[in-house]
Amino acid sequence: MPSYTAPVNDIQFVLHTLLKASQQDIPGYEELEADITAAVLEEAGKIASNVIAPLNEVGDKEGCVLENGVVRTPTGFKAAFEQMKEGGWTALDCDPDYGGQGMPILLGTAVGELFSAANQAFTMYQGLTHGAYSAIHAHGTDAQKAKWLPKMVSCEWTGTMNLTEPHCGTDLGLMRTKAVPQENGSYKVTGQKIFISAGDHDMSANVIHLVLARIPGGPEGIKGVSLFIVPKYLVDEDGNVGAANGVSVGKLEEKMGIHGNSTCVMNFDEAEGYLLGTEHKGMRAMFTMMNEARLGVAMQGMAQAEAAYQNAVIYAKDRLQGRAVTGAQNPDGPADPLIVHPDIRRNLLDQKSFIEGARAFMLWGANMLDRSHRSGDAAAEGLISLLTPVLKGFLTDKGLEMTIQAQQVYGGHGYIEEWGMSQFVRDARITQIYEGANGVQALDLVGRKLAADGGKHVMAFFDLVKNFIKENEADEALKKDFLDPLKQASKDLQASAMFFMQNGMKNPNAALSGSYDFMHLFGHACLGLMWAQMAKAASEALASGTGDASFYETKLATGRYYMARQLPATSMHLARIQSGADPVMTLPAEAF
């Protein structure tokens, strides 16, 4: 069975050496002292390693079962969920007015990584609840928030989001689920939704569904969609759970991975629902949940890569195969460990350099969300809006790739179920698909986010890179190994954006044909920036003579690897983008 150890030191490095969290001027960040975050992370790490991770294989093998209309979760899930609730982990970054602990999103994201890496399917139950909580918190009336949020914060009640229907996924304008107004102000919601994660289960007393539906007579297309709170069980004025609502599970989906999470077909048969937000403005409210969820999915992609990498390293150090070409490294044994071989080291360094760069990128994103939400910083809001599709698309694409590379270290054993590596691959695969498939993330990035507000947010990113390089170019070691490669990556990113500006209006396919490459080019540039900043932070820590010198030296060596071996991919992506639409669009449909 695979093991998992929380990478507390590395997270602490990002929080304090890189981001200097407790020194930032964001309300609540003064509480993020290193000793406090270390205590939280270490305790979360114990639960992740000792409680949740051992259930990962159990959930994968047992899956969920639909019995008499109720979904039964795998053995041990319910007890573990109770432990999560009792420890207050579901409420870490929720509003204290509703029973939350009020910690920043930054810390919530860091803790979320540990739980997701240990058991993604299990952690999704509270993750979906947090998303539904956020939507109600942002768009609900005071009465709605008072009624629904306290028990969602504690996860006594859990939550979901219901978007997809059998005939429409991304194109929500085709939605058929309807919500008919009633005299008492409620609505009767009727329709079917599919792919609903955590749609039903036996770990909470109620499930609060957020459902997109049409009010008859509303505008056509996406402009006519509204969002409704539809509980599994009705709740009276005193907050007591009562009769069953018109909500049922049609079936459980059989999936490639995340077997421990109940992915349901949900049927709504004149279920009582309550409008959340404004009529016909449902997508606005839903996107509150979706944007948070996309950062969470980016974290899942990185977290699965981390868990797989940890096990691949253990195997590479233990498994004896062949001899090092430069001479035996384990002369008393029958062979050398795998890790002496250059291609195994390349494989592991691909993983390590991606994971550590991605972690910094993810936590920087959470930091921007806090700056936006807690300080009302419009610039931070604009930048994280621009970078959300990059985070989601790039980190999940590369996260899956890294789980496959970890599996490859095992050779044939990686393909055998008893070693557990295939689960990381199968569980990571969904992250590229849900919360907006990655192709759609790329289209959103190029079609909407790039030009938003006259392009000022992407220009802000370019300025951020340029200023960092200018401020640090006197450091020769940093310049050669980090700043010069970052400068080239930034030039490639700017050249691709210029190509879209010059060609996109007259030939939209020229831009959209390159959108996926642009998302990856942008992702590499972001990780290049993270590595350059981490290199500076590690160098300063080394110079100060405090802390673990070997940790900082390892950080620098890993960063040099990324800059030398991974960041040059930006030139490849630029060449693809500049080839335009013809290579993609010339072949007629009937020739495929």
Image (spheres, grey):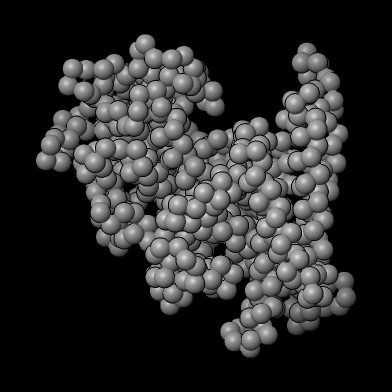
Q: Could you tell me residue 393's position as x and y percent?
A: 62, 43
Q: Judge left or right: residue 240 versus residue 471.
A: left
355 on left or right of 5? right
- Between 184 and 161, the one lying in front of the other is 184
Which of the image's four quarters has the C terminus? top right
Residue 251 is situated, as x and y percent measured from the top left of the image, at: 38, 27
- Observer-nearest residue: 215 or 203? 215
Relative placement, left or right, of 15 versus 132 is: right
Q: Is residue 495 visible?
A: yes
Q: Nearer the viewer, residue 454 or 172?
A: 454
Q: Is residue 204 visible?
A: no
Q: Residue furthest bottom?
A: 545
Q: Is residue 493 left or right of residue 54?
A: right
Specify the farthest residue to the right. Answer: 326
Q: Is residue 154 above or below residue 179?
A: below
Give the farthest residue toward the left.
238
Instruction: Identify the residue at horizontal 52%, vertical 55% (top origin).
Output: 368
The answer to which image quadrant residue 133 occupies is: top left
Give the number of callouts.
0
Q: Which residue is depicted at the point 35% across and 28% down?
A: 278
Asked if 4 appears above or below 290 in the picture, the reply is below
Residue 308 placed where, x, y %?
Answer: 59, 57
Across and down, in percent, residue 349 comes to 72, 64
Where 447 falls versus 337 (above or below)? above
